[in-house]
Image (cartoon, coloured by chain):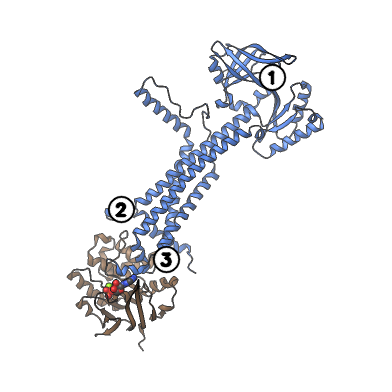
């Protein structure tokens, strides 16, 4: 019967805004004594916006990090699908398989890879190396080229005795292009007996994927070389398959088509043949990424709830301190539903203002996070050099664990979700002051001051 | 024919605090004709303010009946009292109770705006009412910039915004100096004429009590007509 219609909203907005935020400063003739006491609401707006900013940064930075890391894994190492092969499979069988897979819809490229471990040594030191035997198809793949940065030399070892090293492996070993490195692998060529194999490689290139965790120990050689050097019991050979959409639903379809091919050709019966998607292969890595992200978001969400409760208590305090004004309005014929709506709308408006301001700042900071971080880093290092000239430069995001450049993509779904939840929570906490205001009895006015 | 605009029959009101029961009104009768001024006197604590609050539906009563401008207050549910308040009565208290964050014009206009007048209409009426109470030039002043008498006149203008059939004033000059009280008195006296309303006025001030067409003394829970 007394529902609020749009044109009934205007007086509530007029009254509520003035109550909570005071008179707009422009064209205001209000005595200065009446200004400033509305600070609580601007404070609540600030509280909400400040609490939202880190949420955006964490969300977009962690999304960007996870996306960036995932892309790098998929394009430079894991591929989208892996068809594992027994080491002894003939080159002919393998090439036939690659051709069949390339014929499938949605497949962009295939490449052959043999992986294993070794020990890389140079006069500068020795360190365990992840030996990757690649073929030319891998380095020709646009995804691989996109994420691999060549520091010096070439991206692929052109000769059997050449190797391309990951940036940090080269740094640890203290070698550059043209230097030589010894790779020590274990071989069991003599009936189960292991003995070390030493091979000298010339460094043909130094590369980086931008994610140290991924490429720190890369020792890239030709796949034939890897087949020859690596211990068959620990080496892994596979055909890496790149598809048009590794994140979409078509990936599993392609995987099962490849499986069908294996069944038809009778290969599936041979141990060692198996097809897996990148999600199967890197499952634990991405599970830990997303649980870290969830934890961070949970902490940030608690900050928003705290800010909302702060808003609710500011409004409740306001109602308690302004009982008389509310009673006056009621004595003048303003309904309890109207006064309740004022505080409900006021709370929601405060939340909305806070959410919008916080979103704008949060999105802005997220967008420029790389520049901001390097600016802060430069400032810290500048100051610390002034204070202690011998100090080591500080790196805010240790590149051992983080991408050197965070790829930020702004996702509108998250923005809508955060703003929506922020407004809803603000309205929810405003229910308390709204109900409180509706219980104010106008009769107290006649006994005012007695 | 002269049907009274206010008619109370066997009105009973008690306050109980703990075991003590305070009898404010005991089967009191009261009636007032349209367009009249009625003044109510009585010792402090006799229940004058409580009676005004009952007429204004700010306070409920125990038994009896109160009919004002066709509304039977005893039958109105709490939820719809605001309709009665916004359309039938206007209140003036001893304290002005203006809202500090709003200027005089806005203070007067607000109850009209909240009651459903358009913004234009509410502000236009408010300006007319400020003219009526002699504050044409004070429209954009804030309560803190007005004198006590001026604030009380703004409060009277506010009570008139929804064109009430009854104005209830509870010791409106109680806080004012003699000169301001005198100005207010003449304003109140003109009110039934200029605002087409009926005035119930509670006062201690014998001079103000004089403006009444009728005068009652509230004592021991009953009204005694003294003029
Ligand atoms: N809510 C209440 N609870 C208990 N007693 C009350 C309440 N309101 C008023 N009273 C008492 O009722 C009596 C009448 O009060 P009031 O109407 O304000 O008198 P007046 O205006 O004539 O001075 C006083 O004794 C007052 O203490
Ligand atoms: Mg009184």
* Residue B172 location, quadrant: bottom left
Residue at 47% in and 34% down: A369
Chain drawn blue in the picture:
A
How packed mark 3 is, by other alpha carbons closer than 10 Å (few <14, some 14-19, many 20 or more), is many
Residues tagged 3 and 1 counted as in contact (Cβ below 8 A): no
Q: Earlier in the sequence, mark 3 or mark 2?
A: 2
Query: Label 1's element?
Result: helix
Do marks 3 and 2 both belong to one polypeptide chain?
yes
Residue B160 seen in the figure: no
Lateral position of residue A254 relative to residue A122, left or right: right
Rendered shade, chain B: brown
Q: Is residue A34 above or below residue B108?
A: above
The picture places residue A341, in percent across and down from the top left corner, at 44, 61
Q: Mark 3 points at which residue?
A: A336
What chain letter is assigned to the residue under label 2? Answer: A
Residue at 24% in and 60% down: B145
The picture places residue A113, in percent across and down from the top left corner, at 69, 23
Give residue A35's mark: 2
The picture places residue A197, in percent across and down from the top left corner, at 67, 12
Residues tagged 3 and 2 counted as in contact (Cβ below 8 A): no
What chain letter is assigned to the residue under label 1? Answer: A
Mark 1 Cβ inside 8 Å of ligand 1: no
How packed mark 1 is, by other alpha carbons closer than 10 Å (few <14, some 14-19, many 20 or more), is many
**Front residue (pair B109, A303):** A303
The residues tagged by marks 3 and 2 sit, at their Cα atoms, a distance apart of 27 Å
Q: Mark 1 points at which residue?
A: A223
Do marks 2 and 1 both belong to one polypeptide chain?
yes
């Amino acid at each position: 019967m007394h529902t609020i219609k749009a044109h009934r909203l205007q007086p509530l907005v007029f009254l509520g805004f003035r109550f909570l935020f005071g008179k707009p400063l422009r064209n205001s003739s209000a005595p200065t004594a009446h200004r400033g006491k509305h600070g609580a609401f601007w404070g609540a707006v600030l509280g909400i916006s400040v609490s939202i900013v880190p949420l955006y940064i964490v969300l977009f930075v962690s999304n960007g990090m996870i996306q960036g890391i995932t892309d790098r894994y998929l394009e430079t190492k894991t591929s989208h699908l892996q068809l594992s092969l027994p080491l002894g499979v003939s080159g002919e069988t393998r090439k036939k398989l690659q051709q069949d897979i390339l014929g499938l819809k949605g497949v962009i490229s295939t490449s052959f890879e043999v992986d294993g471990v070794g020990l890389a040594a140079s006069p500068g030191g020795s360190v365990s190396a992840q030996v990757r035997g690649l073929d030319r198809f891998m380095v020709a793949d646009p995804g691989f080229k996109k994420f691999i940065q060549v520091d010096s030399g070439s991206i692929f070892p052109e000769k059997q005795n050449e190797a391309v090293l990951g940036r940090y492996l080269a740094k640890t070993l203290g070698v550059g292009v043209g230097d030589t490195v010894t790779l020590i692998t274990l071989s069991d060529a003599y009936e189960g007996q292991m003995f070390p194999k030493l091979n000298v490689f010339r460094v043909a290139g130094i590369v980086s994927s931008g994610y140290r965790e991924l490429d720190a120990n890369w020792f890239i050689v030709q796949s034939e070389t890897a087949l020859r050097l690596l211990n068959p019991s620990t080496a892994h050979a596979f055909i890496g398959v790149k598809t048009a959409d590794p994140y979409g639903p078509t990936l599993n379809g392609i995987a099962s088509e490849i499986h069908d091919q294996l069944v038809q050709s009778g290969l599936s019966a041979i141990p060692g043949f198996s097809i897996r998607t990148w999600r199967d292969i890197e499952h634990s890595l991405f599970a830990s990424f997303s649980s870290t992200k969830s934890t961070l978001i949970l902490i940030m969400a608690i900050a928003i709830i705290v800010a909302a409760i702060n808003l609710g208590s500011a409004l409740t305090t306001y109602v308690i301190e302004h009982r008389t004004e509310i009673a006056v309005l009621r004595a003048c014929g303003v309904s309890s539903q109207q006064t309740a709506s004022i505080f409900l709308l006021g709370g929601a408006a405060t939340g909305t203002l806070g959410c919008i301001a916080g979103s704008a700042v949060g999105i802005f900071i997220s967008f420029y996070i790389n520049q901001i971080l390097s600016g802060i880093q430069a400032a810290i290092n500048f100051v610390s050099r002034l204070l202690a000239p011998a100090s080591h430069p500080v790196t805010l995001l240790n590149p051992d664990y983080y991408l050197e450049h965070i790829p930020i993509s702004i996702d509108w779904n998250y923005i809508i979700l955060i703003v929506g939840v922020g407004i809803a929570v603000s309205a929810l906490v405003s229910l308390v002051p709204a109900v409180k205001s509706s219980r104010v009895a106008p009769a107290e006015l006649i006994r005012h001051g007695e | 024919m002269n049907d009274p605009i206010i008619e109370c029959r066997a009105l009973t009101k008690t306050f109980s605090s703990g075991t003590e029961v305070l009898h404010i009104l005991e089967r009191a009768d009261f009636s007032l004709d349209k367009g009249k001024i009625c003044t109510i006197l009585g010792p402090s604590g006799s229940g004058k303010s409580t009676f005004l609050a009952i007429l204004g539906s700010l306070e409920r009563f125990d038994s009896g009946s109160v009919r004002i401008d066709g509304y039977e207050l005893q039958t109105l549910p709490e939820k719809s009292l605001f309709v009665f308040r916004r359309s039938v009565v206007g209140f003036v208290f001893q304290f002005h109770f203006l809202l500090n964050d709003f200027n005089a014009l806005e203070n007067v206009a607000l109850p009209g705006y909240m009651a459903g007048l358009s913004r234009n209409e509410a502000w236009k009426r408010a300006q007319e009412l400020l003219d009526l109470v002699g504050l044409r030039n004070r429209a954009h002043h804030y309560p803190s910039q007005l004198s006590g008498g001026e604030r009380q006149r703004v409060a009277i203008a506010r009570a008139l915004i929804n064109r009430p059939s009854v104005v209830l004033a509870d010791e409106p000059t109680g806080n004012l100096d003699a000169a301001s009280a005198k100005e207010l008195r003449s304003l109140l006296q003109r009110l039934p004429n200029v605002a087409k309303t009926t005035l119930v006025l509670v006062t201690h001030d014998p001079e103000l009590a004089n403006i009444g067409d009728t005068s009652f003394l509230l004592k021991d829970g009953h009204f005694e007509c003294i003029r």
